[in-house]
Image (spheres, grey):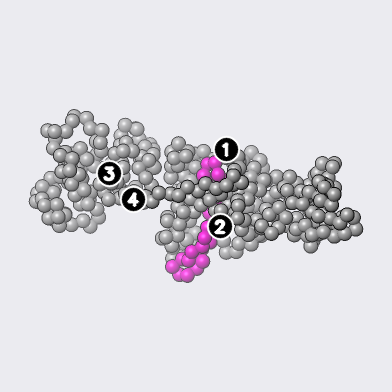
């Protein structure tokens, strides 16, 4: 009976698709139209169970699924092609008695019978060497991750380049906004609003791209990340050319690619609206397995650390304090030494670690070693 029932399920699910030609599907299945409409009627009345020969079917079936629920599963899957059976199960359970929702296994079977399951390619392991950054993430606002999503064009040719900021623990997307410019000033204005709205994170994790970090600068700092450090935020930098170090953020970008970029809007204004809708859905509708099938909005909380502006640098008594001039230099023992434009106009601390070798710090951020004349 199993093969026959599978054929009936496939027929019914195809026949329920918008614009389906029932007569043609009956011919393909080798059944009369009368028989085809009989199975459609049974499905509407009893769901998947109605497609079995009733005299052979147990009274209670673990795969019982009313027709309207099957249609709801298919509707949800078509609206969210990347959501699997577990996510769909969590969404279906909202606001209803758990006993009214089919199991994850049943939902997976419905998707398979409806031809809505694509074989997955095995994901390669992204294990890296031991120096891979591993910031401590135990709760909301322990670490925010930030990056620019690779740009695409709207159908009228405009360039759409989103800046994205995400809370690593809750997966909550704090920001997803299209940027006209990607300068330090423009990005800093976005973060100023985020800090005022959500408070400060303990750390921000970035790759090594501008304006977040610079591999050629002391301590990898830019003017933007130096500002973060001055607020008491720890900077976590990924390894050069290792996007997997920020893997959670990259996976979120992959969702954005399939769900926003691949259906590019007509104009930038329409694209902004589409991106805003996607962010609401990601935060408030989509359940996450890592969050015990809760949404990011259910678990994210505002940071208890309010934004209060840059701090005044202070260093232990063993350190010499020197002001970095507007061109990035400090003066020591009658000589000028270049440090970084990122900390221009700010005080740094220096302590001798070996003769002629000074360790440099900006607050608690390591700027590297400065070699000075004896």
**Disc assigned to residue 139:** 1
Alpha carbon distance from label 2 to label 1: 24 Å
Question: Cβ–Cβ below 8 Å for labels 3 and 1?
Answer: no
Distance from the alpha carbon under mark 1 to that under mark 4: 34 Å
Q: Is residue 153 magenta?
A: yes
Label 3 to label 2, Cα distance in Å? 38 Å
Q: Which residue is mark 3?
A: 110
Identify the secondary structure beneath mark 1: loop
Q: Is residue 352 left or right of residue 300?
A: right
Q: Which range is magenta?
A: 149-178
The residue carrying mark 4 is: 119
The disc placed on residue 148 is 2
User: Distance from label 2 to label 4 (Cα)?
Assistant: 30 Å
SS label for mark 3:
helix
Q: Which numbered disc, 2 or 4, marks the residue closer to the eye?
A: 4
Labels 1, 4: front one: 4
């Amino acid at each position: 009976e199993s093969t026959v029932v599978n054929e009936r399920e496939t027929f019914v699910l195809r026949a329920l698709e918008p614009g389906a030609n029932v007569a043609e599907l009956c011919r393909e299945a080798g059944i009369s139209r009368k028989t085809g409409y009989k199975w459609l009627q049974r499905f509407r009345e009893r769901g998947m169970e109605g497609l079995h020969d009733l005299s052979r079917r147990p009274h209670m079936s673990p795969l019982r699924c009313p027709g309207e629920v099957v249609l709801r599963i298919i509707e949800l899957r078509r609206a969210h092609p990347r959501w699997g059976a577990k996510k769909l199960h969590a969404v279906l359970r909202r606001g209803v008695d758990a006993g009214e929702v089919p199991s994850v296994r049943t939902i997976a079977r419905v998707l398979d019978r409806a031809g809505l399951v694509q074989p997955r390619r095995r994901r390669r392991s992204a294990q890296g060497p031991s120096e891979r950054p591993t910031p401590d993430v135990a709760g909301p606002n322990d670490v925010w991750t930030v990056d620019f999503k690779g740009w695409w064009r709207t159908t009228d040719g405009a360039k759409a380049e989103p800046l994205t900021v995400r809370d690593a623990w809750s997966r909550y997307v704090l920001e997803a906004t299209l940027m006209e410019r990607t300068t330090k000033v423009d990005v800093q204005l976005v973060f100023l609003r985020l800090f005022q709205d959500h408070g400060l994170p303990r750390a921000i994790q970035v790759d090594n791209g501008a304006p977040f970090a610079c591999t050629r600068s002391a301590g990898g700092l830019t003017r933007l990340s130096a500002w973060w450090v001055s607020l008491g935020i720890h900077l976590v930098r990924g390894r050069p050319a290792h996007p997997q170090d920020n893997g959670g953020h990259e996976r979120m970008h992959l969702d954005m690619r399939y769900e926003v970029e691949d259906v590019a809007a007509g104009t930038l204004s329409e694209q902004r609206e589409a991106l805003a809708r996607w962010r609401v859905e990601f935060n408030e509708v989509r359940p996450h397995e890592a969050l015990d099938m809760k949404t990011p909005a259910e678990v994210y909380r505002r940071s208890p650390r309010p934004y209060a502006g840059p701090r005044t640098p202070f260093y232990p008594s063993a350190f010499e304090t020197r002001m970095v001039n507007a061109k990035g230099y400090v003066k020591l023992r009658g000589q000028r030494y270049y440090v970084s434009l990122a900390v221009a106009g700010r005080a740094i601390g220096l302590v001798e670690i070996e003769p002629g070798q000074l360790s440099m710090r900006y607050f608690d951020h390591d700027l590297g070693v400065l070699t000075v004349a004896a």
